[in-house]
Image (spheres, rainbow, N blue to C red):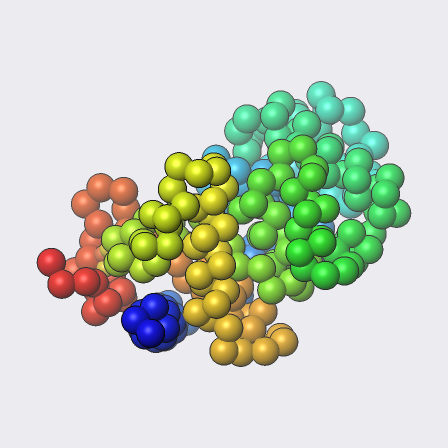
Amino acid sequence: MSSVKSNAHLARELRRAYRLMFARFGHQNWWPGETPFEVCVGAILVQNTSWTNVGRAIVNLKAAQVLEPRALFALSETKLARLIRPAGYFNVKARRLRAFLRVLVAEFDASLPKLMAGETAAVRERLLAIHGIGPETADSLLLYAGGHHSFVIDAYTKRIFERHGWGQLKVKSVKGKKPEAEYEALKALCEKALDHKRGGAKLDYWQDYHAQLVLVGKHYCRPREPRCEQCPLKLLLPPS
Ligand code: SF4
């Protein structure tokens, strides 16, 4: 009974958190990218870097007229690495991008809709099997490029949730078990608590929810000296 109560309480808090963030920032219309394919490329390039740097790499790819699956895959790894250099870790990212493109081009006829077709869980497994695609990238691709209901967890989400005590019992219960267990626990918790909309409305809600958390994490919930006084989530801080 108490767990039912705490789940309901958590759901109320998380939904209120969205209303507070939305009231401050407005709808974010995320993810940055003009096409679903550009979203995928950006999601792979953004690992361990900022969107500003990814933007520079994307500009290079557009200028070279290769921001299209077959054209990008036709580039040598060296040429690709040179073009995406501004995104950092460019050799590693060139390999990862090519691994994604190899599957997209060779197995799915260079068609993103074909790659993304099927049950969410099955498509997620398909993406996770590609070299260099971890849970956060897979969920970003699913949610922002594939139209799948798959909530994204990132470092900002983890920090905000930890500071507010949201779902900590669940996270603690899996800590130290498997590297991805904490990620999966938080993801499942969010998907359950934020499951009150359907279809396109739910997709938009989850897309914008993650975008709002990124804003809070970037501007207020910093690793050191969080700016709680100015933060829209201040009202939801647990009593100290
Ligand atoms: S900055 Fe403070 S109020 Fe804002 S999310 Fe972080 S802990 Fe919460």
Apparent side of residue 13 relative to residue 34 in the rendered image (left or right): left
Kindly identify the residue that appears in the image at 36 percent across and 73 percent down: 4
* Image quadrant where residue 214 sits: bottom left
Judged from the image, the quadrant occupied by ligand 1 is bottom left
Instruction: Please state the horizontal and vertical placement of residue 188, each as a whole percent of the image.
Output: 49, 59
User: How many numbered marks does the figure carry?
Assistant: 0
Nearest the camera: 113 or 194? 194
Kindly identify the residue that appears in the image at 50 percent across and 41 percent down: 180
Instruction: Please state the horizontal and vertical placement of residue 175, each as a whole percent of the image.
Output: 38, 42
Q: Quadrant of the C terminus?
A: bottom left
Above or below, 10 against 150 in this view is below
| Residue 59 seen | no
Nearest the camera: 182 or 64? 182
Kindly identify the residue that appears in the image at 27 percent across and 42 percent down: 223
Above or below, 21 against 218 in this view is below
Instruction: Please state the horizontal and vertical placement of residue 36, each as a whole percent of the image.
Output: 69, 56
Nearest the camera: 99 or 56? 99
Residue at the left extreme?
240
Instruction: Please state the horizontal and vertical placement of residue 1, each as a whole percent of the image.
Output: 33, 74
Kindly identify the residue that appears in the image at 50 percent across and 64 percent down: 191
Nearest the camera: 13 or 224? 13
* Image quadrant where residue 146 sits: bottom right
| Residue 125 seen | yes
Apparent side of residue 233 relative to residue 153 in the rendered image (left or right): left
Apparent side of residue 77 relative to residue 54 in the rendered image (left or right): right
